[in-house]
Image (cartoon, helix red, strand yellow):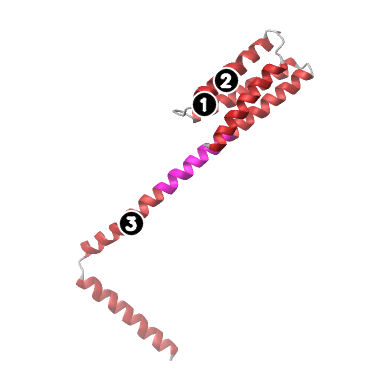
Amino acid sequence: MLRFLGLLMLLAIVFSLGYYTGQHPVGELNKTLRGIMKPLQDQTRKILDSTLGMERDLRVRHRLVEAKARLIQAKAELLDRNYGNAARELAEAAKQLEHTRLAQQGDESTMKVRELITQVREARVELRMGKMVSRTRLDGIQKDLDTLLASQAEG
């Protein structure tokens, strides 16, 4: 009995859909579907754009944190008088900052990143030439990097 009612219901639904499509032309149905799909596509595009923006921001922040870690490691190497290792860590920090600068094209913090890259590269060159780099200079670079990280977290 239940099967019979289910079959009867299915036949009624199929008949209703057939009757509806017979009364309304296919072009009208396509217009209705396009009207429904357009807002969905716009919303999907907005969500995708915001997701890509968040991913870019996370990558930039990760590279800044990595550059800070390399800078701290360079300071530790300086304390241990491992000048070659310190220069290598500064080179890696500059490389991470360069990647950050490339990811931030058109952003106002790009100038700050360029200044940091210049400072890190100058310190590295001085180490490679055998000159002593003061710890306060690296502390200043780290402080600038911290302010950049803080501004990145706000924006």
Question: Residue 25 versus residue 126: which sits nearer the camera?
Answer: 126
Q: Position of residue 51 (x, y in %)?
A: 48, 45
- CB under 8 Å between discs 1 and 3: no
- Classified by dominant secondary structure, the portion drawn in magenta counts as helix
Asked if the magenta segment contains residue 50, the reply would be yes
**The furthest residue to the right:** 80
Q: Nearer the viewer, mark 3 or mark 2?
A: 2
Q: Residues within 10 Å of mark 3 (few under 14, many from 20)?
A: few
Q: Is residue 16 left or right of residue 54?
A: left
Q: Secondary structure at mark 3?
A: helix
Relative height, residue 73 to residue 155 (above, below): above
Q: Which tag, 3 or 2, sits closer to the chain's start?
A: 3
Give the residue pinned by disc 1: 101
Give the residue pinned by disc 3: 37
* Residue type, label 2: Ile
Q: Position of residue 62 (x, y in %)?
A: 60, 35
Q: Is residue 150 left or right of residue 105?
A: right
Q: Please state the extent of the stretch shown in magenta in the rendering.
A: 46-61
Relative height, residue 71 to residue 128 (above, below): below
Q: Position of residue 44 (x, y in %)?
A: 40, 51
Label 1 and label 2: CA atoms lie apart by 9 Å
Q: Secondary structure at mark 1?
A: helix
* Residue type, label 3: Met
